[in-house]
Structure formats: structure tokens, C-alpha cells
Amino acid sequence: MEVFFLRHGQTNGNIARRHQHSNTPLNEMGERQAREVAPKIATLVPTHFISSTHLRAIETTRIVAQVCNIIPDTHPAFEELDRPLWLVGRHYIGLTTTWYVIRWFFGLPVDSGESYEAFVRRIKGAQAHLESLPADARVVVVSHAVFVNIFLAHICVKGRLSVWGAVKSFLNIFSLRNTGIVHLHYEPNINTSQCGWSIIER
């Protein structure tokens, strides 16, 4: 199976580098990015098209899927990390975000939002959903930078990431540009002790 994660197009929140709510739409550049990447996605000949339920992902999916002539599905397992509402509008780089991320990663109380453990359980649910698809499937998933990079970090890891693994994963979040593509391959393995996933290109 081939899986292609596509990050949604640009939003004003991306430009401002601030945490966003689920109803943040694409801006004009984001719509243009989606139109520009659509022919490339079409050449991948997807058999399945899955979108996060967040508006910016749905808008990206609508533009791209029209060119691919495929009817997409939405799936809540592929949504962005659910962060506390008080974090929305805050800058990615700052004391408030740093305080939140440290507490979130180490499992310390953060009055609302999705815990690290809950997020990983959801990621594993998303992984199981992909693994349930036909072996010859070519799947495009429109999602978000945090989700994609934490997914990649956990595809062959059952437990908690190491501190260094978490640092690398968070740094990779900033390198996945809007409408950037990550290509993965999944090969079911008879030996269940081995991971069937591999990252082809990121």
C-alpha cells in the first residue's frame, strides 16, 4: 500500500505562526497552493482519498479531489491535535506554547484539550484504519503538520517517544510546508514483531 500525506493549504494562522481552531479556512494563497498541487496528486492515481474534518483540510481536499475525479471521505482520526482553547491565537514560539508542550509531553495536567496518550491512541486508530484498506490501495490523506509528524514518529513505536525522539519530531513539524507531501509504504509483515511501515520520501 502507498500512503501520501498531504498537508492542507496555507491559512492566515500559518502566516502568523499561531495556533488555530478547527474552523480556520484557507486563505487565497492556500487555495492557489491546493490548485497547484492537485495535478501532482492526480498523477499518483489515488484509490482512496481521506480528509481531516477540519475546515482547512476539507477545503484543500475539495479542490484537489475534483482534479483527481474521486469522492473523498472525512475521518476524525486524522484531525489535528486538539489543543486547549486558550492556546488558540497564541504564537507557536513563546513561553505559553513551550509551557504547554512540556506539560503535554510529560503527561502533566493541562486543564483541557487532548492528552499525549489520547492523541497517540487516535494516531494508532488512524494507522489501523489505513492498514485495513486493500494491499494495493493508493491512499491520499489530507491532514495537519503536527498530526503527520507525530504519526510518522509513532508508526513503528508502541510506547512513548524518547525526549530526543520528541524533539526531532517537533522540529520536523516546521519543515512540512503547506501542501507538502510525505510518501509512506505499508507492507503487511507475517512477522508481527517487525514494522511493515517505511517512509519513502518526506
Image (cartoon, rainbow, N blue to C red):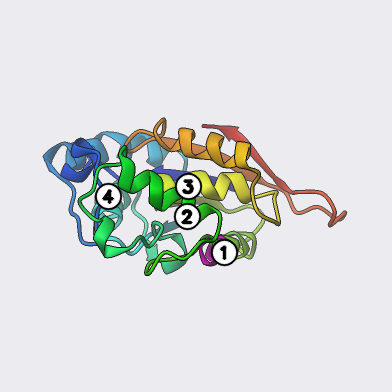
The x and y percentages for residue 113 are 38, 66
- Category of crowding for the residue at label 3, using alpha-carbon neighbours closer than 10 angstroms: few (below 14), some (14–19), many (at least 20): many
Q: Does residue 1 appear anywhere in the picture? A: no
Real-space Cα separation, disc 2 to disc 3, in angstroms: 21 Å
Mark 1 closeness class: few <14, some 14–19, many ≥20 residues within 10 Å: some
First in residue order: circle 1 vs circle 4? 4
State whether residue 93 is above or below residue 108: above
Q: Amino acid at mark 4?
A: His
Q: Which residues are magenta?
A: 118-122
Residue 177 visible within the image: yes
Q: Residue at x 31, y 36 (%)?
A: 37
**Residue at image mark 1:** 117
**Horizontal and vertical percent position of residue 12:** 16, 43
Give the CA distance from mark 2 to mark 4: 17 Å
The residue shown at (16%, 36%) is: 29
Q: Main secondary structure of the magenta part?
A: helix
Question: Label 1 vs label 2: CA separation?
Answer: 12 Å
Looking at the picture, tell me which residue is in the foreground, 70 or 184.
184
